[in-house]
């Protein structure tokens, strides 16, 4: 059943200034375009300001500079997007991934369970694993030998946590995430690949979120380390011995090759490829489809992905690109000729 909140309650929860009817009842959050009189919406981008005149929202979260453009109930804050995020947490209706310990769950007798642990159907928890208080393990999950999962961490269905992986408190793993699989370590002997056992671990800090089908490989010798408050989107590959600093965010389908160290509070967009053995300093922003082939030592924004163009433009540009060497040689010849002509004139 949906819980209903008064506008006064919501204002108090996000420390907002309330203008309007504090007794107005709110069921959920919605967009300006789709909201009804039982919904609260928000304006975080001025390009949607015109929708304030047509929205049916029971209330709107906005900043002081936009308040005059809406005549209805409003909550005035400094940062509407952060306020929206906080309200979304308060009003979240997402269910638990598990309730109690299901009879079909296989939990080894040596496993240490904290208080109020929930394990769903067909999950497997191997020997000597440790699950902290309020941990939720979804249906079909695997938690390997001697793995440790901290308090309040939630695993959705079919998450695999390999042996000896350590996960901190208040983490969230979406379905299909694989933590601690083997890194891509092989030696070539006479044309045949010889596997190198990956004996490191994965160490994950507190308040880390990992998206669906994202893979974090265990270290070859040392550990792969993901520090506190890192957020990883879906379909990301983090290779062995990578270290990701606190507060860094990586968007979907990006790939980080082995032994790369990424600093704190970096923002890495989707489809980024980062070569192995790189170092990226704190505070770096990398735009989509960028290829990182050397270390970054200065904070800032970096790009290499080519924006789209019409096929005709692209083909013409590629034809020019193939001839760059020839263009360079011709330019050098012209420069040389120009210098000779100058000497003659002198």
Image: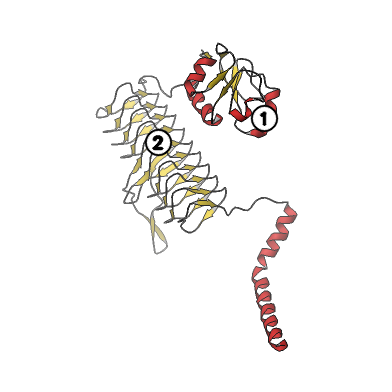
Residue 104, image quadrant: top left
Identify the disc placed on residue 160.
2
Cα separation between marks 1 and 2: 44 Å
Q: Residues within 10 Å of mark 1 (few under 14, many from 20)?
A: some
Residue at 64% in and 33% down: 46
Instruction: Examine the rendered structure and indicate whether residue 323 appears above or below residue 27.
Output: below
Instruction: Examine the rendered structure and indicate whether residue 320 appears above or below residue 214.
Output: below
Instruction: Examine the rendered structure and indicate whether residue 317 appears above or below residue 250.
Output: below
Q: Nearer the viewer, mark 1 or mark 2?
A: 1
Q: Residues within 10 Å of mark 2 (few under 14, many from 20)?
A: many
**Residue 303 placement (x, y as % from top left):** 57, 53
Instruction: Examine the rendered structure and indicate whether residue 299 appears above or below residue 203.
Output: below
Q: Which residue is mark 1?
A: 49
Quadrant occupied by the C terminus: bottom right
Which secondary structure, mark 1?
Answer: helix
**Residue 89 placement (x, y as % from top left):** 48, 25
Which secondary structure, mark 2?
Answer: strand
Identify the disc placed on residue 140.
none
Evaluate if marks 1 and 2 touch, with contact meaning CB atoms under 8 Å apart. Answer: no
- Front residue of 47/120: it is 47
Residue at 68% in and 71% down: 327
**Farthest right residue in view:** 312
Q: Earlier in the sequence, mark 1 or mark 2?
A: 1
Residue 102, image quadrant: top left
- Front residue of 275/200: it is 275
């Amino acid at each position: 059943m949906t819980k209903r909140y008064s506008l006064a309650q919501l204002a108090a929860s996000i420390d907002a200034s309330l203008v309007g009817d504090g007794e107005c009842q709110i069921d959920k959050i919605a967009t300006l375009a789709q909201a009804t009189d039982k919904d609260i919406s928000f304006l975080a981008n001025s390009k949607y300001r015109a929708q304030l005149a047509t929205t049916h929202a029971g209330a709107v979260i906005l900043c002081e500079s936009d308040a005059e453009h809406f005549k209805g109930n409003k909550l005035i804050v400094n940062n509407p997007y952060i306020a929206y995020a906080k309200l979304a947490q308060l009003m979240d209706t997402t269910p638990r991934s598990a309730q109690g310990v299901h009879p079909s769950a296989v939990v080894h007798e040596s496993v240490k369970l904290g208080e109020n642990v929930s394990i769903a159907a067909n999950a497997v928890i191997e020997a000597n694993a440790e699950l902290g208080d309020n941990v939720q393990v979804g249906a079909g999950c695997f938690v390997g030998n001697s793995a440790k999962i901290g308090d309040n961490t939630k695993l959705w269905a079919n998450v695999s946590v390999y042996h000896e992986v350590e996960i901190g408190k208040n983490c969230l793993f979406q379905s299909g995430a694989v933590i601690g699989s083997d890194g891509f370590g092989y030696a070539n002997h006479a044309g045949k690949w010889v596997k190198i056992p990956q004996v490191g671990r994965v160490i994950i800090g507190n308040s880390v979120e990992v998206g669906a089908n994202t893979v974090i490989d265990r270290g070859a010798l040392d550990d792969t380390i993901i520090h506190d408050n890192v957020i990883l989107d879906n379909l990301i590959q983090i290779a062995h011995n990578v270290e990701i600093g606190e507060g860094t965010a990586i968007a979907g389908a990006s790939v980080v090759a082995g032994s790369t160290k990424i600093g704190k509070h970096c923002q890495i967009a989707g489809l980024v490829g980062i070569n192995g053995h790189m170092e990226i300093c704190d505070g770096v922003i990398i735009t989509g489809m960028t290829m990182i082939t050397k270390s970054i030592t200065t904070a800032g924004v970096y790009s290499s992905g080519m924006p789209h163009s019409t096929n005709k433009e692209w083909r013409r540009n590629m034809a020019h690109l193939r001839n760059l060497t020839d263009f360079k040689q011709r330019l050098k010849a012209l420069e040389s000729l120009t210098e000779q002509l100058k000497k003659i004139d002198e």
